[in-house]
């Protein structure tokens, strides 16, 4: 009942006029999220490394009804770009209501053979840049009582062979953003954090990556995009999509939720409330 009633609570009007950043939105799930937001009349800023692709996405967003659509070109491997991105994007938007962290760097499915440059690049793009963007966005999202949406994977909840660096970056997202959610709750910061746990989605990148290596049913990127935005708009802590129905109860991990509550009793929360609001 809870799952279905929560789903019914979402209406597209919840995102109409909202100011939304979607990273990694020149293709794949990010591109589709931009289009769903446009159809709902949101203001969107899209970003990736490919200017030509972004120009097409913003044009399509305006055709679909976006309140406004802008793009910023750059790599999340570039610290200067990542550190200045949110300020530039929020200037275009006139503020910020939702930060959708979606981009990933490419890494082929293969056994780990000690390629530390690959591990560093994956952790930099798939994890550390998410933290940098969040640090820059936090004051804006606090003002708007906004939302952070973090796109993750089954590989961020279940150890997976052939994608160790990718899996590590997704596990890191869970550790950091689920802890940040506890801090926000403890310090009464009204910013929601939604972790999206996805199975195989039929994007070109993913289908190319798994071809011949594994066979797993894939879910449509168009619907996936809508489900991510629905979960973010409803301020859900986690959402599961593209995995078999029987996996969701296992992924919810009630034991971990119970431990989160029990461990929070050990903290002197009052001490931390003042520090969070200190300049
Ligand atoms: N597809 C799937 O099966 C699954 C996907 N996910 C997650 O969904 C999200 C999107 O995946 P998907 O749509 O398949 O990915 P895609 O490969 O289709 O898109 C990745 C996006 O990230 C951008 N990007 C790549 N490198 C960089 C960089 N260095 N700096 C900035 N942007 C970059 C790409 O644009 P450009 O190249 O122009 O920079 C592109 O827009 C990811 O977080 C992924 O982990 C989770 C589970 C399953
Ligand atoms: C390997 C994909 C990400 C890295 C990438 O973009 N590679 C480019 C390959 S290319 O250079 O040849 O173009 C992974 C992106 C999504 C992953 C899948 C996912 O997250 C869902 C499943 C999770 C499960 O735990 C393992 C299988 C997955 C299908 C997983 C496989 C690897 C990705 C496709």
Image (cartoon, helix red, strand yellow):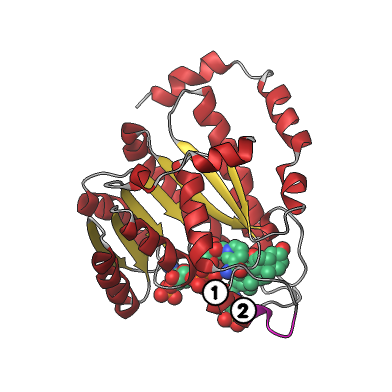
Residue 125 lies in magenta, yes or no?
Answer: no
- Indicate the secondary structure of the residue bearing disc 1: loop
Residue 29, percent from left and from top: 49, 66
Quarter in which the N terminus is drawn: top right
Relative to 60, say whether 151 is above or below.
above
| Observer-nearest of 49 and 212 | 212
Residue plotted at (22% across, 55% down): 67
Cα–Cα gap, marks 1 and 2:
6 Å
Q: In this view, does 80 lie to the left or right of 63?
A: right
Q: Which of 90 and 133 is in front in this view?
A: 90
Question: Is the residue marked 2 within 8 Å of ligand 1, measured from its CB?
Answer: yes
Whether 3 is drawn above or below 118: the answer is: above
Q: Kindly indicate whether the residue at mark 2 contacts the one at mark 1 (C-beta within 8 angstroms).
A: yes
Count of numbered tags? 2
Which residue position holds label 2? 207
* Position above or below: 265 against 79: above
Q: Is residue 102 above or below residue 182?
A: below
Q: Quadrant of residue 151?
A: bottom right
Q: Does the residue labelled 1 lie within 8 Å of ligand 1?
A: yes
Q: Is residue 4 left or right of residue 57?
A: right
Occupied quadrant, residue 191: top left
Q: Main secondary structure of the magenta part?
A: loop
| Residue nearest the observer in this picture, 247 or 27 | 247
Please report the bounds of the magenta region as a residue range.
209-213
Image coordinates for residue 92, horizontal then vertical, percent: 21, 54
Q: Name the residue under label 1.
A: 203
* Foreground pick, 64 / 152: 64
Q: Is residue 65 left or right of residue 154?
A: left
Task: Pick the quarter of the image with the C terminus.
Answer: top left
Which residue is pictured at 61% across the width and 67% down the height?
A: 219
């Amino acid at each position: 009942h809870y799952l279905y009633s929560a789903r019914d609570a979402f209406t597209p009007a919840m995102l109409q006029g909202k100011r939304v950043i979607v990273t990694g939105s020149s293709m794949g799930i990010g591109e589709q999220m931009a289009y769903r937001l446009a159809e709902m009349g949101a203001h969107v800023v899209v970003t990736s490394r490919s200017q030509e692709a972004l120009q097409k996405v913003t044009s399509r967003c305006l055709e679909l009804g976006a309140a406004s659509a802008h793009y910023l070109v750059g790599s999340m491997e570039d610290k200067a770009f990542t550190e200045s991105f949110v300020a530039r994007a929020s200037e275009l938007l006139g503020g910020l209501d939702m930060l959708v962290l979606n981009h990933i760097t490419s890494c082929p499915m293969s056994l780990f053979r000690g390629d530390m440059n690959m591990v560093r690049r994956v952790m930099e793009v798939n994890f550390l840049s998410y933290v940098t963007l969040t640090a820059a966005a936090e004051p804006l999202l606090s003002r708007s009582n906004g939302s952070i949406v973090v796109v993750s994977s089954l590989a961020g909840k279940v150890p997976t062979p052939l994608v160790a660096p990718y899996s590590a970056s997704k596990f890191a997202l869970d550790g950091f953003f689920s802890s940040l959610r506890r801090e926000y709750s403890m310090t009464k910061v009204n910013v929601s954090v939604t972790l999206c746990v996805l199975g195989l989605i039929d994007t070109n990148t993913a289908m190319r990556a798994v071809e011949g290596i594994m066979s797993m049913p894939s879910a449509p990127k168009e619907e996936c995009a809508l489900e991510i935005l629905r979960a973010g708009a409803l301020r859900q802590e986690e959402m599961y999509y593209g995995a078999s129905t029987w996996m969701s109860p296992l992924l919810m991990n009630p034991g971990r939720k119970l431990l989160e509550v029990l461990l929070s009793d050990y903290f002197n929360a009052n001490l931390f409330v003042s520090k969070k609001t200190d300049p």
